[in-house]
């Protein structure tokens, strides 16, 4: 479990990030249905990620980073920014989705342009943190 839980966790957040990218490309091409499906898929995977993340925290605790010197500073910067933005992401995604599902598309678009880059940053830094922690 110690080995596959972090892998599962990282896979979920990467799939979530990829779905959001597909959704973005789709809306730029005015493919609303594809955009909708990809974004809802991305949200489901992000929610699954959150469940596994909490599970992992209670079952395994956290793994401390052992690197030293400047890589440690880089690691802490990535970890702290990732954590703060990941916390903000929850409410942002809910409001973004709510506006889309209520068909308030121009308001949806306004907030989505903030939500999307944050989402991608959280997904990419999640992957980097995993790679740094587990030495990939
Ligand atoms: C949390 C999930 C979602 C995110 C992050 C998201 C993201 C975005 C972004 C970034 C844009 C602006 C694209 C641009 O012009 O630069 C956009 C536009 C749009 N989205 Fe979403 N979206 C999400 C969910 C949905 C859903 C579920 C629908 C349902 C149909 C939807 C429908 C639309 C439509 C119609 C537009 C075009 C709005 C316009 O240009 O006036 N989105 N979305």
Image (cartoon, grey):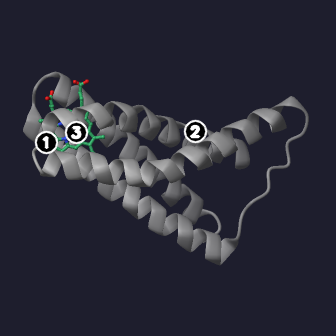
Q: Could you tell me how far apart the alpha carbons at marks 1 and 2 are, in whole angstroms? A: 31 Å
Q: Earlier in the sequence, mark 2 or mark 3?
A: 3
Q: CA distance from mark 3 to mark 1?
A: 6 Å
Which of disc 2 and disc 1 is earlier in sequence? Answer: 1
Residue 58 to residue 123: above or below: below
**Residue furthest toward the bottom?**
59
Q: Which residue is mark 1?
A: 104
Which secondary structure lies at badge 2? helix
Q: Is residue 135 visible?
A: no
Query: Taking 75 as reference, is 112 left or right?
Result: left
Name the front one of labels 1 and 2.
1
**Residue 90, percent from left and from top:** 42, 54
Instruction: Please give the residue where the numbered disc 2 appears in the rendered image.
Output: 125
Residue pictured at 49% horizontal, 67% vertical: 52
Of residues 19 and 4, the one drawn nearer to the viewer in this rendering? 19
Q: In the image, 26: left or right of 56?
A: left
The C terminus - image quarter: top right
Judge from the rendering whether residue 104 lies leftward or rightward of residue 56; answer left or right.
left
Q: Which mark is residue 108?
A: 3
Numbered tag placed on residue 13 in the rendering: none
* Secondary structure of residue under mark 1: loop
CB of mark 1 near ligand 1 (< 8 Å):
no
Q: For the N terminus, which image quadrant?
A: bottom right
Distance between the alpha carbons at the discs numbered 2 and 3:
25 Å
Residue 16 visible in the shown view: yes
At 63% from the left and 70% from the top, the residue drawn is: 57
């Amino acid at each position: 479990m110690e080995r596959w839980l972090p892998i599962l966790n990282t896979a979920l957040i990467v799939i979530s990030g990829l779905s959001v990218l597909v959704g973005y490309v789709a809306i730029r091409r005015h493919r609303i249905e594809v955009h909708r499906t990809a974004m809802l898929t991305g949200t489901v995977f992000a929610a699954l990620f959150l469940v596994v993340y909490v599970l992992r925290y209670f079952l395994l605790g956290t793994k401390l980073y052992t690197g030293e010197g400047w890589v440690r500073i880089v690691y802490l910067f990535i970890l702290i920014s990732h954590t703060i933005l990941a916390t903000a992401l929850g409410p942002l995604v809910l409001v973004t989705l709510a506006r889309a599902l209520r068909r308030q598309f121009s308001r949806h678009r306004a907030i989505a342009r903030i939500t999307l880059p944050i989402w991608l940053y959280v997904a990419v830094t999640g992957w980097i943190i995993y790679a740094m922690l587990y030495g990939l």
